[in-house]
Image: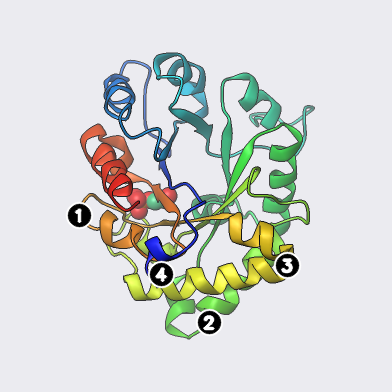
Amino acid sequence: MRREENNLARKILIAGNWKMNGLSGQLEEVRKISEGCSATVGEVDILVCPPATLLRTVRDAAHSDLLVGAQNCHAKEKGAHTGDISAEMLRDAGASHVIVGHSERRADHSECCATVRSKLEAAHRAGLVAIVCIGETLEEREAGEALSVLERQLENSLHDDVTAGNTIIAYEPIWAIGTGKTASAGDVAEVHSHLRRRLVERFGQEIGTSLRLLYGGSVQPTNAASLLSVADVDGALVGGASLKAQDFLAICEAARNCR
Ligand code: PGA
């Protein structure tokens, strides 16, 4: 089943994850994205997630329709956690969204699903929409374990009060992140329909079918149209290509044409 035959109530989201890139003197790309997306933004949600140091600057520089989010948060609201940033602080700095459980945080900071879940709870406490990332390693895929690994991550990273208004899921196969290798449309379709079934089983038909499922991992202008046409792919989480306005806008345009 292709996307147009599927649930069109789920608006496509194109989210840019800048990771640890960006300085205050380099906001030209944001301005270009902000100007360039004005035609698309009614039909496609567009989000940029700069490093926390730039949240306020990007929020102030961007068109109000452009969504701005963060890449991580601490589970607690405040306290003795040197160097950490709470979800409330991110919101205060202009974020409406936050990514939790990105595989780079799971790997670099040993974040397990229980940690991700507590960050998800923190995001909701602060009124942020959370993008919860899950993804399998190459070894797990080759061992035929991808679906069971993803199912476990999905189960353990989400709490029971998830809704389409407060949570978005991103499937990001770890072997596809920053490698130029993309999962095939067939593999993405298999994973997303499996995740959709699990979401419906756990949260019921209404919430399960309205939660958005993004794909991430080497999404580029050249492959965006085919990935975004897959049923149950409701958008993309874009790393490298989100740093160049021209590429990011081309992905947004591909999303618009998928509707
Ligand atoms: P990539 O990163 O597009 O550079 O592969 C995606 C991500 O990590 O969110």
Q: Residue 202: which numbered mark, if any?
A: 3
Residue under the point 42% across and 72% down = 189
Give the structural element (helix, strand or loop) at label 3.
helix
Tell which circle, 2 or 4, labels the residue nearer the N-terminal end.
2
Q: In this view, does 255 lie above or below 85?
A: below
Q: Mark 1 points at which residue?
A: 222
Q: Is residue 9 left or right of residue 29?
A: right
Going by the numbered disc 4, the residue's amino acid type is Val
Q: How many C-alpha atoms fall within 10 Å of the one at disc 4: few (<14), some, or many (≥20)?
A: many
Going by the numbered disc 3, the residue's amino acid type is Arg
Report the coloring of the rendering: rainbow
Tell which circle, 3 or 4, labels the residue nearer the N-terminal end.
4
Tell which circle, 3 or 2, labels the residue nearer the N-terminal end.
2
Residue 2 pos. (x, y %): 37, 68
Q: Mark 2 points at which residue?
A: 145
Going by the numbered disc 2, the residue's amino acid type is Glu
Viewer-closest of 72 and 45? 45
Give the structural element (helix, strand or loop) at label 2.
loop
Q: Is residue 203 above or below residue 256?
A: below
Q: Are marks 3 and 1 in contact (CB under 8 Å)?
A: no
For marks 3 and 1, give the one nearer the viewer. Answer: 3
Q: How many C-alpha atoms fall within 10 Å of the one at disc 3: few (<14), some, or many (≥20)?
A: few
Give the structural element (helix, strand or loop) at label 1.
loop
Residue 10 pos. (x, y %): 51, 51
